Amino acid sequence: MTLQQALLQGTELLEHAGIAVPRLTAEVLLGHALRQERAYLFAYPERELREVEWIHYGRYLHERLQGKPTQYITGRQEFYGREFRVTSDVLIPRPETELVVETALTVAGDARRMMDVGCGSGAIAITLKLENKSAAVLATDISGSALAVAAANAKRLGASVGFAQCDLLAGIGSESIDLIASNPPYVPLGDRTGLQREVRDYEPHVALFAGPTGFEIYARLIEDAARVLRPGGWLVVELGFTSRDRVLEMLGERWCDVHVAPDLARIPRVLAARRK
């Protein structure tokens, strides 16, 4: 079977199963099976697959048809123009989370000490460090397995980031940080059944679900951030869908210069607030 035929068959299978962007998915999976970039497929469409490549490609297609996200199959996801390795121990970095980084660099690009709370793959922390090399960056997560993924990404990308396993800001000194950035869990437990199977069945629940209301982590993070941030320091957090108003109410009188940035779909996506 040639690469062109394999792509056509894979696309047809994925399309019939209702998988989004079936052609692109087939290209990514076939390229992964060949250990080649997608451009290789178009350069050599008549090249025949070796048996071991066909076996790998078939397995990857089967996994995707079962709902496993493409990023967990390939172990890769791009974020802010860099390739991050991902496993099922961490959330897959989303494009909209890049707005957390952009907002943080806008409001506190000269911060000396930055922190990523609930770092997962390390995408936010590592990007902040690489975009502001003079800053000291610390990343925390409650999951030791997630921290191992993040530390490996930092090493591979050449980012000098410190890592600590703790629950949010537990153990972090008072008034010691200039910027806290976070994409916290914000999905209510009751919404579990309505999630896409790729998210519900494969991504780590500790990074998805905040509790019955979805605001439990926000409340704890905002409260403790007021202790950890230096006066004038910034808190930048990603917002869940329709969560803006409730999170704004949580801020209270200890915060100022509050603003919300929308994503490309005009959905309120990132909140930034400065400690008085």
Image: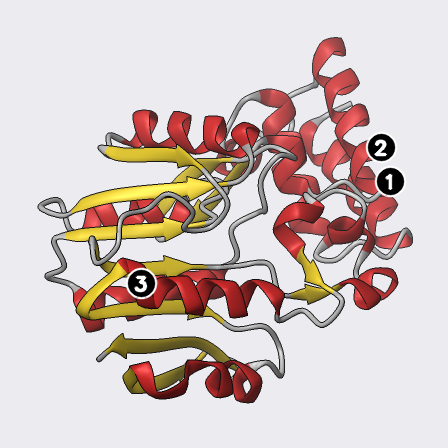
Residue behind mark 2:
62
Mark 1, other Cα within 10 Å: few <14 / some 14–19 / many ≥20: few
Neighbor class of circle 2 (other Cα within 10 Å; few <14, some 14-19, many 20+) is some
Q: Residue at x 52, y 73 (%)?
A: 239
Kind of residue indicated by mark 1: Gln
Q: Quadrant of the C terminus?
A: bottom left
Residue at 73% across / 10% down in the picture? 52
The picture places residue 3, in percent across and down from the top left corner, at 68, 29
Q: Nearer the viewer, mark 1 or mark 2?
A: 1
Rounded to the nearest angstrom, the CA distance separating label 1 from label 3 is 45 Å
Q: Disc 2 or disc 3, which is closer to the eye?
A: 3
| Contact check, label 1 and label 2, Cβ < 8 Å | yes
The answer to whether 247 is drawn above or below residue 134 in the figure is: below
Tell me residue 176's x, y (percent): 20, 53
Q: Name the mark on residue 66.
A: 1
Q: Nearer the viewer, residue 166 or 34?
A: 166
The number of numbered badges drawn on the structure is: 3
Check disc 2 and give the amino acid type. His
